[in-house]
Amino acid sequence: MKAASDVKAASNVKAALGAKPAGAEDESSAAQMVRQMFNSIAPRYDLLNHVLSANIDRVWWNRAARRFHGVLADPDAAVLDICCGTGDMTMALLKHRPNGARPILAADFARAMLVRGAGKFDGHGAVALEADALHLPLRNESLDLIVTAFGFRNLANYVAGLSEFHRVLKPGGQLGILDFSEPGGLVGRAYAVYFRRVLPAIGRMICGKDGPYNYLPASVGSFPDPPAMRALMQSVGFTESSWEPYTFGIAGLYTATKPIVVG
Ligand SMILES: C[S@@+](CC[C@H](N)C(=O)[O-])C[C@H]1O[C@@H](n2cnc3c(N)ncnc32)[C@H](O)[C@@H]1O
């Protein structure tokens, strides 16, 4: 049973929810622009990530993976890393897989990102799948765990993404969404200056383009806050939703479960 406040919060944010790069007119053009953007920055993506986050991203991927150690340790568990990009979240998940475990599916819709990811995880317990998170080529109730790192925020329709995750998870299956957030207080104000001014300038310098690193702070700014995200997850049928802040809330891990319906 959803709390009335959850439903109200979800309906308040549902209307305009999804990534909207500047110039996107609808969901399909937004998705296309996101895909093109990631294809174009793929060669520099890892370098930029590590420079811009001072390598804290590694700590975040590992911490998120540890949270799911229980399910990852089961060799038969069916696991999807969606929006896997260049594969660092996948590599963190693989540390928890026993020898001979079923391969992790690592999926992304930007081929240039996925090719780089496959270069890291191919032959080490994961397989690459070129796929759109909003239309997964997977059977209903076929997965035990879906994880996504810094990808969910880029989906053109968040509710459609969550519904698709809910469709392919087995009852009892778990969802983990690692993404940026906007911390409050003093840390938040200092971070906002870095995120909105310094980061786009460094990004522009390293990748030689303006767009992607202006889009990043804008997309975080329009991403639902933790109570709204949790309400969205609940609104499509997930339960036990939670948000764990990482590094003063600069990033955080959302988790939720697809409930087992009895009777
Ligand atoms: C910021 S990168 C994150 C990559 C990786 N997970 C990481 O933590 O570094 C976001 C990724 O999401 C992918 N993505 C965005 N929308 C997608 C969609 N609808 N379907 C599949 N992948 C998508 C992009 O192509 C990109 O590779």
Image (cartoon, rainbow, N blue to C red):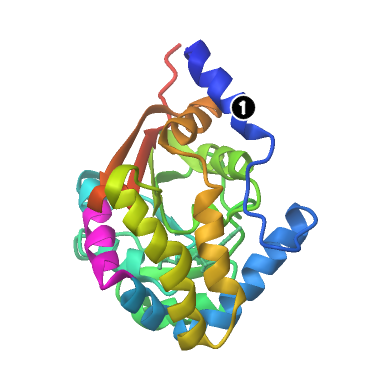
Residue 75 lies, with reference to residue 169, above or below; the image says below
Q: Residues within 10 Å of mark 1 (few under 14, many from 20)?
A: some
Q: Residue at x 32, y 76 (%)?
A: 50
Residue 54 within the magenta-colored segment of the rendering? yes
Closest to the observer, 126 or 239: 239
Q: Secondary structure at mark 1?
A: helix
Judge whether residue 171 can be spotted in this image.
yes
The quadrant in which residue 16 appears is top right
Residue range highlighted in magenta:
53-65
Residue 106 lies, with reference to residue 71, above or below; the image says below
What residue does disc 1 label? 12
Residue 7: x %, y % from top left: 55, 19
Residue 216: x %, y % from top left: 51, 63
Closest to the observer, 154 or 54: 54
| Count of numbered marks | 1
Residue 25: x %, y % from top left: 80, 56
Closest to the observer, 193 or 247: 193
